[in-house]
Amino acid sequence: MRWLTNTQKEYVGRFTNFEIYVIKKPIKEINKYTRFNVSYDKIREGRKITKIQFHISLKGEKTIENSSSKPKKVVTLADAQQSPYSQLLIGAFLLQISDVQDEKLMLSLAAKIYPKYDEFVEKYSLDILKKHLEYVKAHSTNIKDLVTYLDNALENYQKRLVGQEKDNKESKPKNRKKGVIQKEKIPDYISNPGKNKLTQKGIEDSKAADELLAKINGDLK
C-alpha cells in the first residue's frame, strides 16, 4: 500500500500517522465530493496490522452485505500453538516440541484439522477425541504427512461411530405403543354365563339326589 501511494519514506514509525494522512483524510474527501462511500477494516496478525480491506459502494445504492466479503480471522502461529488440540496432540505424542515451532505444519493443522475437531467435540466430547488420538498414536507407524493422516483417521473414526449408533438403534427392542394396556382374558364363566348353566335334567337329578340323601338320614335317626 505504501508503494501504491508512493509513501515508502513518509509517515514511517507508528501506523497512526500513516492512517490519518494516507487513509482517513482521502476517504473523508472521497465520501464528501464523489458519488462513492468508502470505509475500511484493519486486519491484524497478533498486535501487528498487516492488511487493510476497503469497502466501496455507490451513494444511495442498496447493498446486501455478503458474509464472504468479511475479513476472515487470520490464524497466527501463536494461535495454533495455544490451541487445546495442539496440547492434546502433544499429550498423545503425535506432536513433538520441535514440531510446535514448525509454522507451516501448525498453520495447516489450525486450518484443516482443528475446525473438524471443533465439530467432533460438539457432537461427541473432548474425552472421546482424546481417546481417539491415543488410539491413533498406538496404531500409527511412520507418519509422513501428519495433517493428511489425522484427517483420514478422524474421517474413518466418525464413520465407525455412525455405524455403531445405527447398529445400537436396530438392536434395541421395539417399544410398546404408548397408552395400550394389555387386558387379562376374562374367564368364560364370567363373560358367557350361559355356558355354566345346569341343564333341566341336571337340575332334576340333583334334586332327586338331595331328597334321597334326606330320607337316608331320617331312617338312620
Image: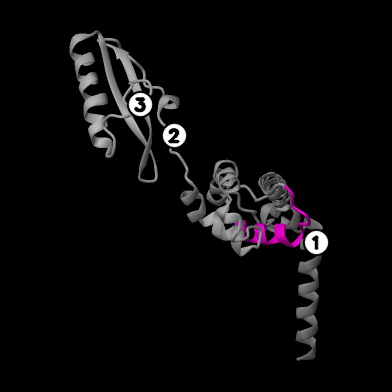
Q: Nearer the viewer, residue 27 or 212?
A: 27
Q: Which residue is mark 1?
A: 202
Q: Which residue lies most toward the bottom here?
A: 221
Q: Is residue 77 above or below residue 92?
A: above
What crowding class fits label 2: few (fewer than 14 Cα within 10 Å), some (14-19), or many (20 or more)? few
Q: Is residue 118 above or below residue 50?
A: below
Q: Is residue 190 above or below residue 69?
A: below
Q: Nearer the viewer, residue 132 or 45?
A: 45
**Disc 3 to disc 1, C-alpha distance:** 123 Å
In which quarter of the view is residue 101 placed? bottom right
Residues at marks 2 and 1 touching, judged by CB atoms closer than 8 Å = no
Q: Position of residue 19 (x, y in %)?
A: 26, 30
Residue 131 is covered by the magenta coloring? yes
**Disc 2 to disc 1, C-alpha distance:** 100 Å
Q: Which residue is mark 2?
A: 72
Q: Position of residue 15 (x, y in %)?
A: 28, 36
